Each structure stands twice: as C-alpha cells, then as structure tokens.
Image (cartoon, rainbow, N blue to C red):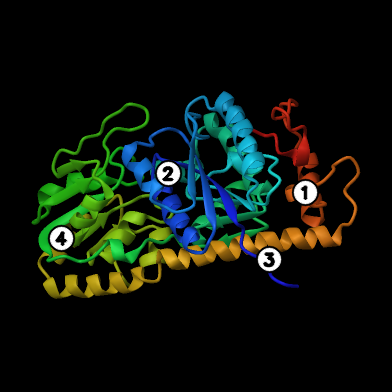
C-alpha cells in the first residue's frame, strides 16, 4: 500500500506552564520546514508577549488561546467540558489531518481525525517520585481521565522508554505506543569561554526538579551556584533559594548564554521524564551532574555524573570533584555534546512525521477494510468508516461506562469519548 502523505495541518494542544510550550514550538518549527502547518490550541494561561512573538515567527503556525484550567489544576471539571467544546469546534473549522494532544483528558474527545497523545509527565508518577507513595484519593478522578485518554488515543507517545513503561504500569497496558525523543536545535546553544560556576535551570517551586537540594548543598560547594527559574508556583506559593544566586525567570536567548558560559550544569531531579534544560546545557558544552533516576540514566548514562537526589552530601562531593578536575570536566563536556546531538529537533520532527503517517495509513486501511459503518455509529474519524481499531474503542467504552451520562455538548456519545 502506498504510504499516506504527511498531514497538511496538525491541531496541537499545549500549555505555557512548563516545558511543553518549548517542545511544541520546536516541533511546530520542524513541521513547518516539512510543509506541515500547526494550529496550536493553548490552555492554562501564561502566554506572555514574548511567547506570542516566538510563535508568530514560525511559518504556518496559528495560535488560539483559551483560559481553561488544565486537567491537573484545582477544580477543572467545568473548564474541561468547555475546553472539549472549544477543541471540537476548532477541529471542525481547521479540518486537521491529525490531532496531537500534549496531555490526556482531551485525547478522549470524539475528534474525527486520528489522535496522538503525548505523555510528557503525569501527577501520579510525579507524586510517587517526589513523595515516595501513591497519590491520595483526591487524584482518582484525574487518574481516570488519564487512563481514558491513553486507552482511547490512536497512538501514545512518550519521550523515553522509562516514561512509556511508567504510564503502562500506572494506567494499564498501552496497546498502541511509541517512543520519540524530545529534541532541540543545537544551533541555539553554543559553548562560550567557560567560567568557574555551576548553573541549574528549572521551576524552583517544583519539588520534582529538586533545586532545593542544590540550594542546601551550595554552602559546601567550592564554586558559585547560579539558578535560573521561576520561584512562584501555580498555587501562589513562593520558594526562593537562600544559598545560590537566583536569576528568576530568564528569557531563552539569555539563558542560552548562561549555558554557554557555565562549566557545569546540575539538576538533581527526583522526576524528569525527559528534561530539555539538561539537553540545552549539553549542547552548550556543560559537564552534567544529574539526579540518578531511570529516565535520566536512559538518556545520559555514560555522558553525565549521577547523584542520589536525596543525598545532598554526595551532590556537593560530585560538584567539588568536577570543580577540581578540569580534564574530567572537559571529557564530560565532550561526551554530553556528543550525546546531545542524538536528540536534535530534526530527529524529533522526523519521528513525529513518521508517527503521523502511521496514523493516516491506519485510518486509510480501516476505511478500505470496513465498507459499511457499524450500526448506529455513522462515520468514524476523518469521515471514514470504523474498522478494527474503531471497534476496539467502542468495546472499551462499553466495558467502562461513564458515571456522567450527559455527553459533550453537541457531540452525542460517539466512541465513548465523553469522559471529561
């Protein structure tokens, strides 16, 4: 069978709270070079003038914003229903070839196009990594939404094998899954003359990043420690570091220069499904000191120093050893840069273009295999007749009836996708 062409346009969801925004723009930039336009639907707030300007510079990218809460935020139920209506309306207007969901709840909507769902992180795995126990019962409804999205997506993607395995362990076996590494444009992060200081970058308020451990270790570290990142959390709390130089939120161009000058990048993360900051630092020639967790081991083993996230003494010792050993720093810098060039934006884009083509091929095959629609169901995604995959979706929906019988406005109970 002739391979399906790439979609002309992708409808992609995103938020501007964390690294998903940078990932989405990087991918949209790569898709544009391949002749694929991106319609970016952003929820959760936080799109400032800098981010709008960055999006405006990408050919073929359109930006739609809505103030709806994200699925992990407090009391999201009403907003998730409104977001569902909004996204389905966008799909009707845009008519994308693929819907790319950078979250979970919206993957369970009755889109007509095939749905690719990317698992960048999740609350349950975050909670286990940060607190060492299961998330409390208050997150059960969130977990059910995540499970529905993963079960009903046409393809589930994660940036590491470890994250894919975690999603399967927590939410059920992933029947249609693929690993695609995140990537960045190496040309944006260049080594500059290195200076004797240690840099970290990330959300200071996020316990997963564990910048508090670096702050606590800093008085015992021989070199100055500099941290870039927002100290204000989404709940209004502020966690300002005490023993490091805190730069606050730094524009990406300026942060690239900090990476270029720093001799060492440190992030003793407890939870990091991929970590763009470590990749950016590696492109810029930093020696890496990272938390010893499965995802970071998978990505950087042999090209970084690892420290137990809970052992602050060990972290200080590793940083001091590097500060005292220029030959080892240089060797780690070279190893990190070499490894980073396997995680480029171009390679990430190729991975997603191949995934989109797989989805379109599968849709075309289903159309050819099932000349008549299932009784009472009408046409499936993209106007094609449901085939085997569609039957699996419907059977799954019947096995897991929804507690709320009211459908998403105007959509009916198509394919069981009303679990928002």
Q: Dot 1: within a 10 Å radius of its alpha carbon, few (fewer than 14), some, or many (20 or more) residues?
A: few
Q: Does label 4 or label 3 sit earlier along the sequence?
A: 3
Q: Is residue 126 visible?
A: yes
**Secondary structure under the numbered disc 1 in the rendered image:** helix
Identified at 71% across, 26% down, the residue is 404
Q: Is residue 235 left or right of residue 241?
A: right
Which quadrant, please, contains the N terminus? bottom right
Residue picked out by circle 2: 132
Q: Nearer the viewer, residue 217 or 93?
A: 93
Q: Report if the CB atoms under discs 3 and 2 are less than 8 Å apart.
A: no
Q: Which residue is mark 1?
A: 383
Q: Are marks 1 and 4 in contact (CB under 8 Å)?
A: no
Residue, disc 4: 261
The C terminus - image quarter: top right
* Residue 4 numbered mark, or none: 3
Front-most of residues 415 and 174: 415
x, y (%) of residue 375? 91, 44
| 91 versus 82 height, above or below | below
Position of 44 relative to 279 (above/below) = above
Mark 4 vs mark 3, CA separation in Å: 45 Å
Q: The residue tagged with tag 4: helix, strand or loop?
A: helix
Question: Residue 133: image x %, image y %?
Answer: 46, 41
Question: How far is mark 3 from mark 2, CA to CA?
Answer: 45 Å
Q: Tell me the residue at 79%/59% (across/down).
A: 366
């Amino acid at each position: 069978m002739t391979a399906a062409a790439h979609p002309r346009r992708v409808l992609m969801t995103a938020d501007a709270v964390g690294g998903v925004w940078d990932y989405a723009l990087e991918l949209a930039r790569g898709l544009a070079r391949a002749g694929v336009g991106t319609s970016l639907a952003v929820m959760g707030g936080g799109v400032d003038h800098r981010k709008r300007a960055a999006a405006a510079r990408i050919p073929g990218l359109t930006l739609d914003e809505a103030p709806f809460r994200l699925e992990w935020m407090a009391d999201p139920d009403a907003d998730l229903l409104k977001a569902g209506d909004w996204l389905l309306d966008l799909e009707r207007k845009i008519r994308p070839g693929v819907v790319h969901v950078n979250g979970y709840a919206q993957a369970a909507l009755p889109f007509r196009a095939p749905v690719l769902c990317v698992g960048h992180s999740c609350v349950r795995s975050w909670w286990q990594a940060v607190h060492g126990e299961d998330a409390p019962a208050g997150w059960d409804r969130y977990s059910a939404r995540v499970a529905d999205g993963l079960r009903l997506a046409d393809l589930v993607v994660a940036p590491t094998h470890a994250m894919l395995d975690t999603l399967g362990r927590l939410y059920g076996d992933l029947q249609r899954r693929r690993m695609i590494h995140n990537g960045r444009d190496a040309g944006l992060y260049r080594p500059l003359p290195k200076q004797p200081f240690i840099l970290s970058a990330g959300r200071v308020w996020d316990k997963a990043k564990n910048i508090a451990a670096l702050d606590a270790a800093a008085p015992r570290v021989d070199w100055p420690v500099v941290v870039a990142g927002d100290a204000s959390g989404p709940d209004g709390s502020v966690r300002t570091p005490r023993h490091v130089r805190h730069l606050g939120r730094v524009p990406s161009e300026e942060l690239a220069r900090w990476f270029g000058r720093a001799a060492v990048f440190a992030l003793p993360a407890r939870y990091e499904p991929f970590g763009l900051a470590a990749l950016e630092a590696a492109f810029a020639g930093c020696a890496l000191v990272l938390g010893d967790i499965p995802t970071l081991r998978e990505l950087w083993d042999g090209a970084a120093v690892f420290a137990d996230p809970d052992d602050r003494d060990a972290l200080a010792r590793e940083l001091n050893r590097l500060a005292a050993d220029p030959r080892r720093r240089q060797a780690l810098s070279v190893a990190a840069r070499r490894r980073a060039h396997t995680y480029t934006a171009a390679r990430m884009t190729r991975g997603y273009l191949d995934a989109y083509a797989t989805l379109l091929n599968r849709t075309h095959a289903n159309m050819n295999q099932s000349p008549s629609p299932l009784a009472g169901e009408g046409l499936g995604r993209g106007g094609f007749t449901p085939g085997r995959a569609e039957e699996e979706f419907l059977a799954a929906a019947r096995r897991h009836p929804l507690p709320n019988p009211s459908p998403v406005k105007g959509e009916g109970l198509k394919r069981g996708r009303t679990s928002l």
